[in-house]
Image (cartoon, coloured by chain):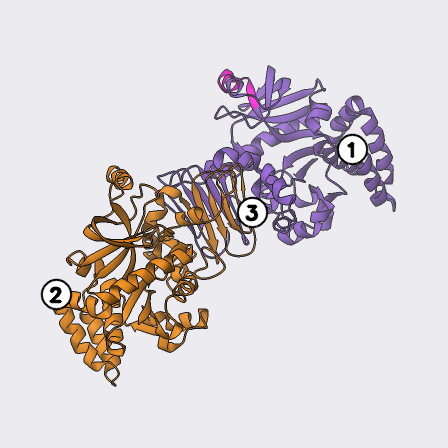
Chain colours: A purple, B orange
Amino acid sequence: MNYAVVMAGGKGERFWPLSRAGSPKQFLKILSDKTLLEETLERTAALAPLERTLVVAAEAFKKQILEKVPSLSGKNLLLEPEGKNTAPAIALAAVHLAQTDPRAVMIVLPSDHFIEPKERLSRILSAAAERAQEGDFLITLGIVPTRAETGYGYIEVGEKTNETDGIALYKVARFKEKPNRTAAQEYYLDRKHFWNSGMFVWSAAAILKAFERHQPKMYKQLKTYSEAIGTSKEEEGRKKLFAALEPVSVDVAVLEKADNVLTIPSDFTWDDVGSFLALERVRKRDRENNLCLGSSLALSSYETTVINEGEGVVAVFGVSDLVVVKSGDSVLVAHKTRVADLKELTEKLASDPKYKPYL
Amino acid sequence: MNYAVVMAGGKGERFWPLSRAGSPKQFLKILSDKTLLEETLERTAALAPLERTLVVAAEAFKKQILEKVPSLSGKNLLLEPEGKNTAPAIALAAVHLAQTDPRAVMIVLPSDHFIEPKERLSRILSAAAERAQEGDFLITLGIVPTRAETGYGYIEVGEKTNETDGIALYKVARFKEKPNRTAAQEYYLDRKHFWNSGMFVWSAAAILKAFERHQPKMYKQLKTYSEAIGTSKEEEGRKKLFAALEPVSVDVAVLEKADNVLTIPSDFTWDDVGSFLALERVRKRDRENNLCLGSSLALSSYETTVINEGEGVVAVFGVSDLVVVKSGDSVLVAHKTRVADLKELTEKLASDPKYKPYL
């Protein structure tokens, strides 16, 4: 059976002042009048019913998730005592699902991406789930690049293993880090490289087998924890497990080492909403390429994004290539070339007790 | 006797969102923790006691002035039913003072300028007042230029008429409009051109004589009004007078036409605080030439002025040559090359009922 596993552990550090420590990206209504998490759950609804949907998130966000997404109940939540990147989060979901249903297929989706149209996503994920049911494959979704993007990791594919109804599976040759501009241009043109989207499909058994093989120490820790599941020691066991685990991505821990990884080149519109720049890719801009959201105005300005979450008016005049965001009583004015480095600014703010309350 | 006449009719349209329709520049604490009007009154205190100080302002600001400057009483206010530029304001003060004291000397100062040190201003104004007491002169203060400024009008001087203790008086050859860059450069170098500061010293009798000669129609209207002063018809008469008068500056109405105008080249630091750019001339900037006022921060930024009047934090990141101002719940982000044209923006905002409440 298929299970949706929604990864909601993100911190959203590149969206200050919209996102604060207490409200990371997946809880923001950045792209529409719904939070990114809600939009993700609308996508998974076509693949698995609510009772087979798990949201993996930090314990600290439990209350917020249940408030913001009333359709979810405590049973849908799998809480991490602390954030340790994607490998521990996915492994946690895998050991739980393997106990519930030894033939469980996990459809793993980040909670804070933009995807359109969702019908195409569903078709591809369904095809992937069928294949994952059949064998020991670790299937990743690779996005067909629409530009020479340097901000994403890439998947280089090898030979095609099969194709049905226009959905093809390829062996993964290798994973590649964020490229420089020249390499990104080559990847864009050679049609053998795809954006690593962080969307995965595999059986719980297959991913646990991969952990056993490539992360034997971690696998042993998971085994110990799995014996506590459903007992009075589960909570304590999970705390111990997460205290012991190294923070590492599933890509580095397992996928880059495994030889049974497949990719489906996927042709829907996808954006990881990694910074404020995602907004102008996703939302319609005016003739001067400005994007004004909320009570805001751009005059004699170009290529500028203005967001006003609250009252008053935010007006820009004679500027270009800026991102201007007002949220609560704080304001960010950043050059577009720097919004990807916003963490530098938030760390600077965090270092001063005067500014820390506004983070 | 000397009388201080403080002109407080300004609208402050170039300081949105700090200044709103209800609170123009002279009521703002732009340069220090005192309003510009209070700072002006501290300067005039050395020249005339409070009982010989008149503040000429719009009737609409009466309450605000008395609240913000508790030392003033209703007797200090000379209220204009409507703003008609400087000629009507000065003429109004002149007819009142001429009735109170036929030998009154008026020291006319705008309420919203920056001057330092005030001791030097006092010395120059005292010297001017002595000269004004002696004869029929219209004395203007011309500021020795410290840069080739294109934003001010200039006074070209002719022959020197006298000099005492390093304070020289020159005949005015002509008044000149704001120059282009080349002319400004010439003016800066030839030492014959001085910034027209809008500060004047003359006897009430002399300026009224000048109105009689160069603005006979206006003079007749003033005469009619002056008969109502101190009677029950004063208020109604003043309303009629201001409804009838043309809006015109004293420079255009009288000074450019008169042949008895003198100038004292003045060597104190002076700024008309005409836009947000004045702040960086007057206040100390950091090593990157940023000026951060209130709870605000500039990172990887240059030549940028950030003002946060309220709570929260205003952070700029990777930008240059901007003015960023948060006041109330509104925010301005303007390129420095455009802050002098801020009226364009405020007119645009005023044209939309959605934004008008924030002006």
Element marked by disc 3: loop
Element marked by disc 1: loop
Q: Position of residue A72 (x, y in %)?
A: 67, 49
In contact (CB < 8 Å): disc 2 and disc 3: no
Q: State the residue at coordinates (49%, 23%).
A: A148
Disc ID at residue A18: 3
In whole angstroms, how far apart are the C-alphas of marks 1 and 3? Answer: 41 Å
Q: Main secondary structure of the magenta part?
A: helix
Chain identifier of the residue bearing label 3 in the image: A
In whole angstroms, how far apart are the C-alphas of marks 2 and 1? Answer: 105 Å
Q: Position of residue B22 (x, y in %)?
A: 39, 65
Element marked by disc 2: helix
Q: Position of residue B230 (x, y in %)?
A: 26, 83
Q: Earlier in the sequence, mark 1 or mark 3?
A: 3
Magenta residues span A185-194
Residue underneath mark 1: A102
What residue type is disc 1 on? Pro
Q: Is residue A313 magenta?
A: no
Q: State the residue at coordinates (13%, 73%).
A: B220
Judge depth for marks 2 and 1 and give the one in front: 2
Horizontally, residue A242 falls left or right of residue A33, namely: right
Horizontally, residue B111 falls left or right of residue A205, namely: left
Q: Do callouts 2 and 3 point to residues on the same chain? A: no
- The answer to whether residue B84 of the structure is visible from this angle is no
Location of residue A167 by image quarter? top right
For this rendering, which residue is in front, A304 or A38?
Answer: A304
Horizontally, residue B181 falls left or right of residue B276, namely: left
Chain identifier of the residue bearing label 2 in the image: B
Residue underneath mark 2: B213
